[in-house]
Amino acid sequence: MSNIIIYGSHYGTTKQYAKELSRRTNIEAISFKNVKEINDYDNIIYLGGLYAGGVLGMSKTIKKLNNIVNKKIIIVTVGLSDPMDEVNKNNIRNNIKKQISKEIFEKAKIFHLRGGIDYSKLNFKHKTMMKLLYNAVKNLPKEKQTAEDRAMIETYNQKVNFVDFSSLDKIINEI
């Protein structure tokens, strides 16, 4: 059985999870940018950072799959918001549905991990997007703010790291 860990990471927390998962499982981890062929693998573990609702590199990578019949597909998202929050989980799952085929979505095992953010390292585009989002939600009445909104308000313009390698255990069990 052949396995691969593929990751899409822009600022590094997803890559940290992918490298640690690789170390614990002895499965090669490679950036989605360097993946040529994924049809040769039986187990495909995709870790992707969440950016503007999408999972970085996932649709581009998953589109390379020709036949999923004998494949095990695990999708792991890494984002700033609390992955235990049901509303947040549903939003992430709905966004994943928009990025991949129904067949792959129904077959895939999906996990959510919490990452982090360092505003000082954001590129201009991402800083601008975050500032616009922050300004849009900071004045919302508390009862209209989602858990995701509150987390963003609390961490805005800071460096926060919620990386927790013990959360990889459930993924390792699935592999």
Image (cartoon, rainbow, N blue to C red):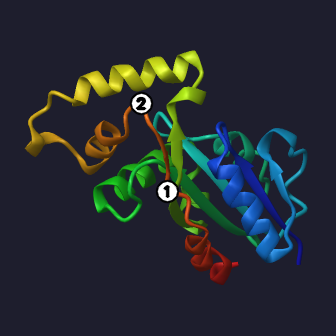
The residue that label 2 is drawn on is: 157
Instruction: Tell which of 66 and 20 is nearer to you.
Output: 20
The residue positioned farthest toward the bottom in the image shown: 173
Q: Earlier in the sequence, mark 1 or mark 2?
A: 2
Determine the secondary structure under disc 2.
loop
Q: Amino acid at mark 1?
A: Phe
The CA span between labels 1 and 2 is 16 Å
**Dot 2, crowdedness within 10 Å: few (<14), some or many (≥20)?**
some
Q: State the quadrant of the C terminus.
A: bottom right
Please tell me the numbered disc located at residue 162. 1
Instruction: Tell which of 81 and 159 is nearer to you.
Output: 159
Note whether 20 is above or below 70 in the view shown.
above
- The percent position of residue 86, horizontal first and vertical second, equals 30, 62
**In this image, 20 relative to 86: left or right?**
right
Q: Is residue 78 visible?
A: yes
Determine the secondary structure under disc 1.
loop
Label 1–label 2 contact, CB within 8 A: no
- The percent position of residue 76, horizontal first and vertical second, equals 59, 60
Instruction: Tell which of 95 and 119 is nearer to you.
Output: 119
Q: Amino acid at mark 2?
A: Asn
**In this image, 24 relative to 124: left or right?**
right
Question: Which residue is pictured at 32% across the width and 61% down the height?
Answer: 85
- The percent position of residue 80, horizontal first and vertical second, equals 45, 47
- The percent position of residue 9, horizontal first and vertical second, equals 68, 43
Q: How many marks?
A: 2
**In this image, 104 relative to 139: left or right?**
right
Q: State the quadrant of the N terminus.
A: bottom right
Residue 89: quadrant of the picture: bottom left
**In this image, 97 relative to 10: left or right?**
left
**Dot 1, crowdedness within 10 Å: few (<14), some or many (≥20)?**
some
